Amino acid sequence: VLAEKGNHRHFMEKEIHEQPEVMGRTVSHYVDAFENSVHEIAGLDFRAASRLIIVGCGTAAYAGEISRYWFGSLARLAVEVDIASEFRYRDPVFLPGDIALFISQSGETADTLEAMRLAAAAGVQTLALVNTPHSTIAREASLVVPTLAGPEIGVASTKAFTSQLSALACLAVLAGRHRGHLDRAQEAGHVASLLASPGLMVKALEREGEIEQLAHEIAGHPTVLYLGRNQNFPLALEAALKLKEISYIHAEGYAAGELKHGPIALIEEGLPVIVIAPHDALFDKTRSSIQQVASRGAHVIAITDPEGARALEGEAARIITLPKGSQLTNPLLFASAVQLLAYHVAVYKGTDVDQPRNLAKSVTVE
Ligand code: AGP
């Protein structure tokens, strides 16, 4: 692959900064920017779908988990998400009207490919959300829905993730229209927010200097927790994966509402707890989780938006303020902050950011 780092120290840093461009490119592929509507996709009809099965590994699976909230609320479509290595060996149940979507940057991940073959053998329509057009998964799927992230070199997935989310958001809007759950104005509103996401992402990336400072604060800690609710829960899992992969710091993501069911026992003086807290419908619940961990000594870093920042003043030790996004664009914007945090922790620790130990870019064997 011919790829250059340009002025960047690492491919990962370059790929993080390419996100406004690749999100714009991916959204433009799926929408009509004059009509503020999503294009029809030949061969894809969510009207009669009884269920959407989404399968992937790692970051791709987390993108699928986030989209489950969108397909549910925008299209009333039941979604089942699974990691490919579990899906393929659990003798999965297929139902009439199932559509199965396989997400993969490389299009060569062995477990995802085998999971897709299993669904195809059961007669289920297979969609592939892939970044590599000539990959095996793309070739074998009944329908390809592309992400247009361009080659991703860093082992830690960044721009592929946000372009997967961009495409999934468009598909959820399409499903919402197909199933009669979004009217014209609602569809236009969602599409307009997606078209605005590259500009907001540029602003989010301007927080890099502050995030680098925070990265230095947490680099010496052995464990970091990430909390989020609703669609921010899978983003918390992705944030923890990013930190683990490149900084080798133990990190866990939890649904904020699960704290009292166990994880709160981990809280001790000074433990970094990073809370993904946009001022959304569940903000007050997230805020109460912040209060619970802060009162037990956690060092709370809240990633929020201007309204959330005002509310959390004095409650979180550190606040990163991102621009205000929408239901569909928040996970993309908030992804950039957790990516930058992981990146700067790794740089500070001096790890091999683009080629972390023990990891391969594409896992083509089990
Ligand atoms: C992400 O940072 C990882 N390196 C990894 O989880 C990756 O997303 C996973 O292996 C799936 O790869 P794919 O998208 O190429 O199928």
Image (cartoon, rainbow, N blue to C red):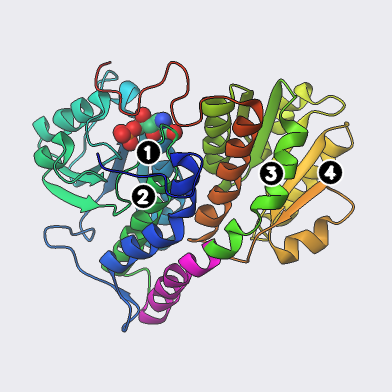
Q: CA distance from mark 3 to mark 2?
A: 26 Å
Majority secondary structure of magenta residues: helix
User: In the rendered image, which residue does mark 1 sit on?
Assistant: 60
Q: Is residue 326 visible?
A: no
| Residue 254 horizontal side relative to residue 86, left or right | right
Q: Nearer the viewer, mark 4 or mark 1?
A: 1
Residue 350 disc label: none
User: In the rendered view of the protein, which quadrant contains the C terminus?
Assistant: top left
| Residue 34 horizontal side relative to residue 289, left or right | left
Mark 1 CB in 8 Å range of ligand 1?
yes
> In the displayed structure, would residue 311 be above or below residue 210?
below
Indicate which disc, 3 or 4, sits on the residue closer to the N terminus.
Answer: 3
Residue 164 disc label: 2
User: In the rendered view of the protein, which quadrant contains the N terminus?
Assistant: top left
Whether tag 1 and tag 2 are in contact, CB under 8 A, the answer is yes
Residue 95 at x, y percent in the picture = 21, 38
Q: Nearer the viewer, residue 201 or 61?
A: 201
Indicate which disc, 1 or 2, sits on the residue closer to the N terminus.
Answer: 1
User: In the rendered image, which residue does mark 3 sit on?
Assistant: 212
The amino acid type found where label 2 is placed reads Gln
Q: CA distance from mark 3 to mark 4?
A: 25 Å
The amino acid type found where label 3 is placed reads Glu
